[in-house]
């Protein structure tokens, strides 16, 4: 099956696809931002350390003057002097190298965050495929990288040329300076070059960072069919099903807490089923169900009804018939109108009796449930 074209990918990447892409190392990265940060902070650090650098290199340049006539002919002495020079250089440069290494790690995590993907370090046949290589070579991404490289050459080359022109008189005078002063001046010029180049690189990074994000989002876009397939596959996963059931249960409990206090009567199985019924002539032509539940939900309906003083009546056959034949917010079937009307009338008589406004009603007579609506006991 052929790959989907870019024109077909009109949908934004789902959270699942974004998470998978991140796990595989597909993150918006900007090499320009890392380079700019290293140059800027490295240049600033070098300026701060100029006195230490200058003193060390000046001392290093004086070493040949301290050789005696035996020094160049004594291998042990030469090794000793060379080792001292290297160790001294290491101690001087160690803070700078440590800072740059830390920056390399931190800047590498911007803007996509730090992710270590071992898969990226493994050899891949796809990377060695010449057809894939040609496709990448003539892609839009490669064209943008080429334009970016040309922009870098122009900006950085122009910056270096202007700086060299500005510093040329100073460079020509350095051969007349003492060794330490000349070395410090050279390091200052070098640090200024780093800072200037870092500033230019940062300008390029300001354009590159949003482009990298846009390019990745475009690459990860999905077709409508991919979205449907992913949704279908996600719903089939056990953890997704469990989460859906959990959310449905939470919504059902919230509906029970809200609806049951509005009911005129609660009829129960009494153990397994519970149905909350309301009659409002302004809303419907017949009594309708405002909440129903089975097992734990039925128990919760009974609890909420008790908390709000609602009438609960044990009518197993009628409860089962309404539970299976009527959805929430739906009127009860016409075949159950008479039975439900008797129940509601009995509730009104009981309320009047409890309020001292009527006589005690007779026990409710057996109610007729049409055979086609009857449900067996559990």
Image (cartoon, grey):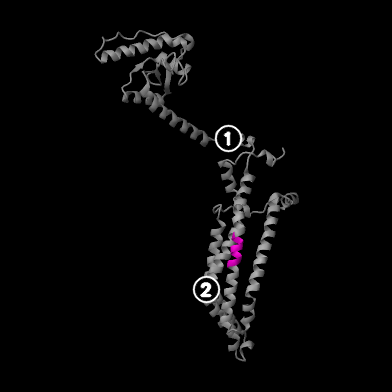
Q: Residues within 10 Å of mark 2 (few under 14, many from 20)?
A: some
Above or below residue 275? Residue 81 is below
Q: Which residue in the structure is indicated by mark 2?
A: 49
Q: Are there few (<14), some (14-19), or many (20+) residues within 10 Å of tag 1?
A: few
Q: In what quadrant of the picture does the C terminus appear?
A: top left
Q: Can residue 80 be seen in this view?
A: no
CA gap, disc 1 to disc 2?
58 Å
What secondary structure is found at the residue carrying circle 1? helix
- The residues colored magenta run 195-202
Q: Which of 63 and 280 is in front in this view?
A: 280
Q: In this view, does 339 lie to the left or right of 14?
A: left
Q: In this view, does 158 lie above or below 128?
A: below
Does 355 lie within the magenta span?
A: no
Q: Which residue is drawn at 68% across and 62% down?
A: 154
Q: In which quarter of the image is residue 110?
A: bottom right
Would you name the residue on which mark 1 appears? 231
Residue 305 in percent (x, y) is at: 34, 23
* Frontmost residue, 372 versus 111: 111
Secondary structure at numbered mark 2: loop
Mark 1 vs mark 2, foreground winner is: 2
- Whichever of callouts 1 and 2 sits on the residue coming sooner in the sequence is 2
């Amino acid at each position: 099956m052929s790959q989907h074209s870019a024109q077909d990918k009109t949908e934004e990447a789902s959270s699942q696809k974004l998470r998978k892409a991140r796990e595989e190392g597909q993150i918006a990265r900007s090499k320009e931002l890392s380079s700019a940060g290293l140059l800027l902070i490295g240049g600033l650090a070098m300026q701060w350390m100029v006195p230490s650098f200058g003193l060390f290199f000046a001392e290093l340049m004086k070493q040949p003057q301290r050789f005696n006539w035996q020094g160049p002919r004594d291998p042990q002495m030469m090794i000793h002097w060379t080792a001292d020079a290297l160790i001294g250089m290491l101690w001087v440069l160690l803070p700078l190298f440590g800072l740059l290494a830390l920056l390399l790690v931190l800047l590498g995590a911007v803007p996509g965050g730090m992710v270590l993907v071992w898969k990226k370090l493994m050899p891949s046949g796809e990377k060695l495929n010449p057809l894939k290589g040609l496709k990448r070579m003539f892609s839009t991404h490669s064209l943008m990288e080429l334009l970016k490289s040309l922009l870098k050459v122009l900006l950085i080359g122009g910056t270096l040329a202007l700086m060299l022109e500005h510093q040329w008189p100073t460079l020509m005078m350095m051969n007349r300076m003492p060794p330490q002063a000349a070395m410090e001046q050279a390091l200052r010029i070098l640090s200024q070059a780093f800072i200037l180049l870092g500033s230019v690189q940062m300008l390029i990074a300001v354009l590159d960072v949003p482009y990298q994000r846009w390019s990745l989002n475009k690459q990860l876009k999905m077709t409508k069919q991919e979205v449907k397939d992913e949704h279908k596959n996600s719903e089939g996963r056990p953890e997704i099903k469990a989460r859906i059931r959990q959310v449905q249960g939470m919504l059902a409990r919230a509906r029970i807490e809200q609806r049951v206090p509005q009911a005129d009567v609660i009829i129960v199985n009494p153990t397994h089923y519970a149905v909350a019924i309301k009659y409002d002539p302004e809303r419907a032509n017949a009594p309708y169900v405002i909440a129903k539940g089975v097992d734990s939900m039925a128990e919760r309906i009974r609890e909420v009804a008790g908390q709000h003083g609602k009438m609960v009546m044990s009518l197993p056959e009628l409860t089962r018939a309404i539970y299976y034949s009527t959805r929430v917010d739906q009127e009860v079937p016409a075949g159950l109108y008479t039975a439900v009307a008797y129940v509601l009338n009995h509730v009104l008589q009981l309320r009047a009796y409890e309020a001292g406004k009527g006589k005690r009603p007779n026990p409710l007579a057996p109610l007729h449930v049409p055979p086609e609506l009857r449900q067996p006991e559990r």
